[in-house]
Image (cartoon, grey):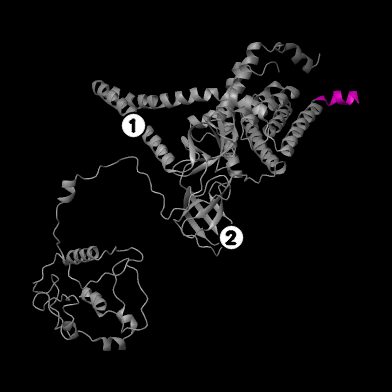
Amino acid sequence: MEALLTRYRNLTVLLIVVFAQLLYLAYQVKTNGDERLIRVWAVTAVTPMAGVVEAVRRNTIGFLQDYFILLDVREQNRKLKADNDHLRMENVYFRNQLSTAEHAGALIQFQAQSRSKTVAARVIGNSTVVTAKAVFIDRGSTSNIEKGMAVVTPEGIVGKVVAVYPLVSQVLLITDPTFKVGVESQQHHVHGVLDCGTGKCQIQQIQNEEKVDVGEWFFTSGEDRIFPKGFPVGTVVTSQPGQGMREVRLNLSGAPGGAEEVLVVLQGVHQNIPATPPPIQQTTAKMLDLPPEAATSAPVVKPQTEADRVLERYQSLGKEQNHVYGAYGSSIPNFNVKPSGEGTGKPNTTQPSGEGAAKSKSTPTVPVPSNNAPPVLGARPSPPKPPAASPATRENRPDTEYQPALPLGAPRRKSTGTKAGTDPSKQQGPESARQ
Amino acid sequence: MNETSHEILTAPVRENWFSRFQVVALIVLTLVAIIGKFYLPRFVANTEWLELPLLLTVYFGLMRRSQIASLFFGAFVGLAEDSLSPANLPVGMYGITKTLVGYFATSVSVRFNVENSLIRLVLSFFFYLFHAFFYWIMRRALLGQVIPFDVREALVHGLLNAVVAVPLFALLDRMKLAGPH
């Protein structure tokens, strides 16, 4: 036996070492316990350098890059380079300051707006495992961070805390293959599970019958008990029926791998899914509002063409009747009403005859261009206008003929069964508009 | 006196010591490799593929030619990596994988001329694939974690690591970190 072990000593040692590690592995899996001691030692040994290295990286790389860029300029023109160098250095400095301030401002603003209690942290290192997506942040148990807490940014979700050490924490990103997030769509409130394990984020567990539109926002549903409900996750890129389940791909609104500053949710508060998509923050360039004088005394552009006049007329009509073009549910404006700014004694307007004349005081007059002066430049003179059709003759016509020509984007209503009850003035409006 | 005994007698006297400097340098380099894997992606984008600890393990296995020393070195490097891995992965995954890599690297070095750059390139490529595939198998079999294994990505990363390995090994040769062979 001894001779055998001596002969196969190397193999024996290998088996012993591997078996010992396997036993240790099995013990961890069975007890579901995290080996704090080894990890604490390793992380404590490594992470103190993180702050120093990160600070050096932040403070040196920008300067080094600028130095190398400016080498060519110095060769070309030394004097100009001296000025240019100085200005560029200042520029970089202020840009960095501005960028940092803007991002910090966004975080602070988000912290103030969010009902969840959060603490800001900075990413200081990556994980050593290629297939696992995890980062270290510079906040630990001394900042009241606990395992399982959600990590977010104002733009979207980032991950969850999987390990907490005194001064740092480890965050498993949502792009990790083992990470799943419960999500809910904004419009149709379809629930699903976000999985970014394949490199492209997909939403699983959505039936083919469910409706998910491209461009629709998804928010956290809170069902995973990690992220509070109502945090933005991303927008749908593709949505198509699949085998059994719908195949929905998502474009994450945040950048989990590239986040520099994050927020750890200490106490999450569920929120409702917002009715409108989250605003896209424009932090690059901000413009002040116009001064009141300039805003009121904006240059008035006179309409040049007939189309401009019609457009202006529709806009004024919509404004008077509080109609918003393109808005869902906004009632159709009465196009027969004269805009308040329009003169009453225009030669192009004629009074309607017959029943229309009887209602001339109650209903607005219909502007009809005269035969002598064609309203559109180059248009042929229109033939004599036939008398306005009576409601009785309209009833004999098919319904489709009386579909009002609505402006672009205006909601269309289904035609009611009885046309006697419809307002003739509203039916005349689009016709006059067509003329 | 046959040819073999003649070679033994005429061969330069091997270093029968493994100086303290070399031990310290090896430990420092190992730590740098592990910490480099920790920090490098923060400095240089898209460098997650670089497996410096693995390359160091392979080099040590190829050049040291002591299976026991190589497997212990691989176990040490792997466990150190495991300790910095996400907490949802138990300690020992990389340890087992790199233990095997160290052992097999030494076994292979007996049969090949590992001083040749081309051999080194091929072996580095092979051991990267072995390492990636075995790690994937272990996560799937032992932990039940179904994670994708991208063959194309593994091949590309293996090739990149092999390309890096050749000059890195040449540099380490100069430092004589492997000690007496």
Amino acid type at image mark 2? Met
Above/below status of A401 relative to B165: below
The residue beneath circle 2 is A245
Horizontally, residue A418 falls left or right of residue A362, namely right
Name the mark on residue A433: none
Above/below status of B73 relative to B141: above
Q: Quadrant of residue A87?
A: top left
Magenta residues, as a range?
A1-9
Q: Quadrant of the N terminus of chain A?
A: top right
**Callout 1 secondary element:** helix
Amino acid type at image mark 1? Arg
The residue beneath circle 1 is A95
Residue drawn at point x = 42 percent, y = 43 percent: A113
Mark 1 chain: A
Q: Residues within 10 Å of mark 1 (few under 14, many from 20)?
A: few
Chief SS of the magenta region: helix
**Callout 2 secondary element:** loop
